[in-house]
């Protein structure tokens, strides 16, 4: 798999040891700092923290697991993306920076899961209602988020109440006879992206046999009855559109689905104002 350890730019990053309390109420001057990197514990993944304009009016906290930058086309762009999201959504964004970790199953999944559990547990200590915390991922990051959510449900860790999956990679059904028309069609007009998706899944799973595991391909889970309220947003031009919709159809009526016209994979980095307005409005309504 392509090395994506620099997918977050480092020009404005600070390696600081912080508590979660200081993360929510930063003690450093933010006059010229819109984000910084923190290390809470050597056993946890590093975090990138992005603040809204008014931290005093903080309403929501979004724990964000970004996708593979090479796959989404957002490589070296996630810092800017998260800054904009924090301001637009008036939310604090905690992005899990896993790019320097071995990006293979199950290593990366277990590390992200441990970090997410830690954040939920610590935020509760500071009277942050779990309904104010949204777990979000895009592309392969949405794969991790969904797989971890199922793992947490099975282990009776009932903290996650809201979730956002953006152009999620969920099925692993990309080889031989693919069941999704959007993916089959994309092999004609976006073959490069299709090959990237296939290569990513082979590299991440390490073995094609692992594509049969629900931990690797969350859409293969049988029981969705305890899955949290979720917003699924797909792009109309995305090869993964149909599997995102198929996932949504397994969820209960409290969940939401949005398919953004003229949007493709990695639309968080799309400069089209209509695309941007559509997905931002959907997220604002949901949170």
Image (spheres, rainbow, N blue to C red):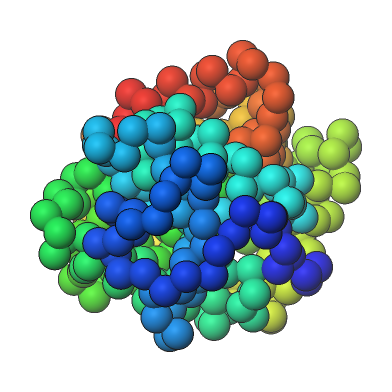
Of all residues, the one furthest to the top in this rendering is 274
Residue 242, image x, y percentages:
58, 38
Q: Could one spot residue 178 in this view of the protein?
A: yes
Which quadrant would residue 181 be assigned to in this image?
top right
Identified at 61% across, 36% down, the residue is 268
Horizontal arrangement in the rendering, residue 98 relative to residue 154 (left or right): right
Of 63 and 186, the residue lying toward us:
63
Which quadrant would residue 57 be assigned to in this image?
top left
Of 285 and 93, the residue lying toward us:
93
Instruction: Locate the N terminus and report the quarter of the image it occupies.
Output: bottom right
Task: Reply above or below: 157 against 284.
Answer: below
Count the marks: 0
Residue 176, image x, y percentages:
76, 60
Identified at 37% across, 44% down, the residue is 92
Residue 113, image x, y percentages:
40, 72
Horizontal arrangement in the rendering, residue 57 relative to residue 13 (left or right): left
Of 185 and 41, the residue lying toward us:
41
Q: Could one spot residue 34 in this view of the protein?
A: no
Residue 174, image x, y percentages:
71, 56
Identified at 27% across, 48% down, the residue is 133
Task: Reply above or below: 261 against 82.
Answer: above
Task: Reply above or below: 249 against 40.
Answer: above
Of 89 and 268, the residue lying toward us:
89
Horizontal arrangement in the rendering, residue 155 relative to residue 115 (left or right): left
Instruction: Locate the C terminus and report the quarter of the image it occupies.
Output: top left
């Amino acid at each position: 798999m392509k090395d994506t350890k620099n997918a977050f730019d480092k020009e404005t990053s600070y390696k600081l040891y912080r508590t979660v309390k200081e993360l929510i109420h930063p003690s450093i001057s933010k006059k010229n700092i819109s984000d910084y990197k923190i290390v809470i514990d050597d056993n946890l993944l590093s975090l990138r923290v992005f603040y809204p304009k008014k931290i005093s009016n903080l309403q929501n906290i979004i724990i964000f697991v970004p996708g593979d930058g090479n796959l989404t086309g957002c490589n070296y762009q996630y810092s800017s993306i998260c800054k904009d999201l924090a301001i637009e959504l008036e939310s604090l964004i905690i992005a899990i920076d896993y790019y320097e970790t071995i990006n293979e199953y199950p290593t990366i999944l277990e590390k992200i899961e441990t970090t997410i559990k830690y954040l939920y547990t610590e935020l509760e200590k500071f009277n942050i209602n779990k309904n104010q915390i949204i777990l979000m991922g895009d592309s392969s990051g949405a794969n991790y988020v969904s797989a971890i959510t199922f793992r947490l449900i099975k282990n009776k860790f009932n903290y996650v109440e809201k979730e956002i999956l953006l152009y999620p990679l969920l099925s692993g059904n990309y080889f031989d006879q693919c069941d999704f028309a959007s993916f089959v069609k994309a092999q004609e007009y976006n073959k490069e992206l299709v090959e990237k998706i296939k290569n990513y899944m082979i590299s991440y799973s390490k073995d094609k046999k692992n594509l049969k595991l629900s931990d690797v391909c969350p859409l293969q889970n049988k029981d969705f009855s305890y899955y949290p309220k979720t917003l699924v947003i797909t792009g109309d031009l995305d090869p993964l559109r149909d599997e995102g919709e198929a996932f949504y159809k397994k969820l209960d009526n409290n969940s939401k689905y949005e398919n953004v016209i003229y949007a493709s994979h990695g639309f968080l980095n799309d400069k089209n104002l209509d695309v941007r307005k559509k997905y931002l409005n959907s997220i604002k309504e949901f949170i």
